[in-house]
Amino acid sequence: MNMSSTTGPIVLAEDVQKSFGANRILKGVDLTVAAGEVVVLMGPSGSGKSTFLRCLNRLTDPDGGRIVVAGSVMTDPATNLPKARRRIGFVSQHFHLYPHMTVLANVMEGPRTVLRVPRQVARERGRDLLARVGLSDKEAAMPWQLSGGQQQRVAIARALAMEPTVMLFDEPTSALDPELTGEVLDTMQQLALDGLTMLIVSHEIHFASRVADRLAMFDAGCVIEEGPPERLLRSASQERTGRFLARLMSWESDLAATSR
Amino acid sequence: MGYQFEWQAAIDSIPVILTGLSATLAVTITVFLVSLPFAIAVMLARLSRFRFLRVIAYAYTELFRTLPLLIVLTWFYFVPAIGFGIRMSPFLVAVVAFTLTFTAFLTEALRGALMAIDPGQREAAMSVGMTSPQVYRRVLIPQALRYATPVIATMWVSLFRDSALVALVGVHDMLFEARTLAVVNYRPIEVLTMTGIIYFALTYPQSVMIERIFAKRRVRS
Ligand SMILES: Nc1ncnc2c1ncn2[C@@H]1O[C@H](COP(=O)(O)OP(=O)(O)OP(=O)(O)O)[C@@H](O)[C@H]1O
Ligand SMILES: [Mg+2]
């Protein structure tokens, strides 16, 4: 991965504000992600996690605050956003593979169109990435022929093809059947082991405790608590965090029970 | 009453009518091929961030979707010649008038298809750093064309049928040849009936084929 040479944080968000109409969604979010760090963002539905993530690569325009990602000041009107986004991988809940292209073409598209990488080079890199996410045998398949878990792994390969400095994941497994989440989480864990900087919105507690260097709890448009997963998951020092985590855990064990 | 329909005259008219098939096809194919890129351009103009372009494109599509084609056709037949002394061949008049109208309808079909694309597609493309033109060229327009293909195929069939109007401005298509023959053999009913049968025989298989192709495709996606 092309690590940024600067020593500052890869993601820096200060006092990020966002409203939709009269609805205040982000009420001053502060968050940093250091190089090589994996941060998992958790919080109740509707608390603004997706909105925050989308502000980071400016799919959504924040109303206020300062955002620096991979060396680009995303909140500066002078910033060339398409150029800045090249270094920010983004994987969404619903994969959104290009349905008119094969799996390999999906992965090659960014390098070919945006970076003007020669076809031969892009193809080789694409094949390497598909091997990395365990889908070498699917390169000629069309997206609709793949399971959700496979599609999501292609989406990850497609983002990695740009050799991003940081990867943002928005609930990458929440649209998947429970038995398919494992393969996607394993892929992401491998990326973490490879030292990739990642910010992940996820409700998968066991994954988070295994992979995250830091957990950030999000509620009602703010980060209310953050720290190493062991500490947060054990003590759950804030009452709201505790309640939320307790709910999640019981829900997860329900799921485990039913799938058994 | 008591009209004696002469089958022999009808059958004899077949080869004469078919001499116009090449002109019918030439008009249909030319209009179709010219309209497709124009329609994409007008659609992009309608979505442009420049208000001026949006207004022009909107006015154009709405105008030509409401004007009867016959009026457009005869306008281009008379006005440039009489008003400006510009001589246009019948084929050119036909192609210009039909293209203007057909492009307007095609634009709407494409725009509808574009709107039906999941916004996540655009965001996925933006997320790898594509600029807006790249997003349209590589991701949105190819998908819009695919979604619109069944509608566009149906529009092709209507275009083929409606191209009979060009006989009015002197293009030697099938209907033109039919009318010319009727004037000399005094058998307009036989000739027109046979022309109708020929149009049906050429159009219906196209419809069925399109129906078959796209019924299969729908199941897949
Ligand atoms: N484009 C939009 N226009 C208006 N309201 C929006 C828009 N996007 C999000 N919202 C609102 O903002 C709030 C936060 O949404 P967001 O998707 O960020 O929450 P979330 O924390 O990601 O929730 P979930 O866990 O369900 O994904 C919700 O109430 C949502 O209805
Ligand atoms: Mg969300």
Image (cartoon, rainbow, N blue to C red):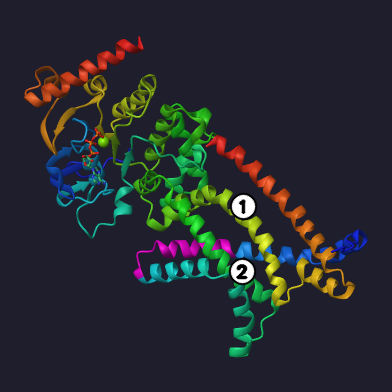
Q: Is residue A199 visible?
A: no
Residue A256 figure quarter: top left
* Nearer to me, A72 or B33: B33
Q: Confirm or deny contact between disc 2 and disc 1 (CB under 8 A).
A: no
Q: Can residue B33 be seen in this view?
A: yes
Q: What residue type is labelled 2?
A: Phe
Instruction: Residue at 38% x, 52% y: name it.
Output: B130
Instruction: Residue at 49% x, 48% y: name it.
Output: B143
Residue A210 figure quarter: top left
Pointer 2 local density, CA inside 10 Å: few below 14, some 14–19, many at least 20: many
Q: In this view, does A54 lie to the left or right of A153?
A: left
Q: What residue type is labelled 1?
A: Ala
Query: Does the segment drawn in magenta span residue A86?
Result: no
Q: In this view, does B168 lie to the left or right of A18?
A: right
Mark 2 falls within which chain? B
Mark 1 falls within which chain? B
User: Which part of the image, by quadrant, shows the N terminus of chain B?
Assistant: bottom right
Give the quadrant of ligand 2.
Answer: top left
Judging by the rendered image, the residue that carries numbered circle 1 is B153
Query: Does the segment drawn in magenta span residue B41?
Result: yes
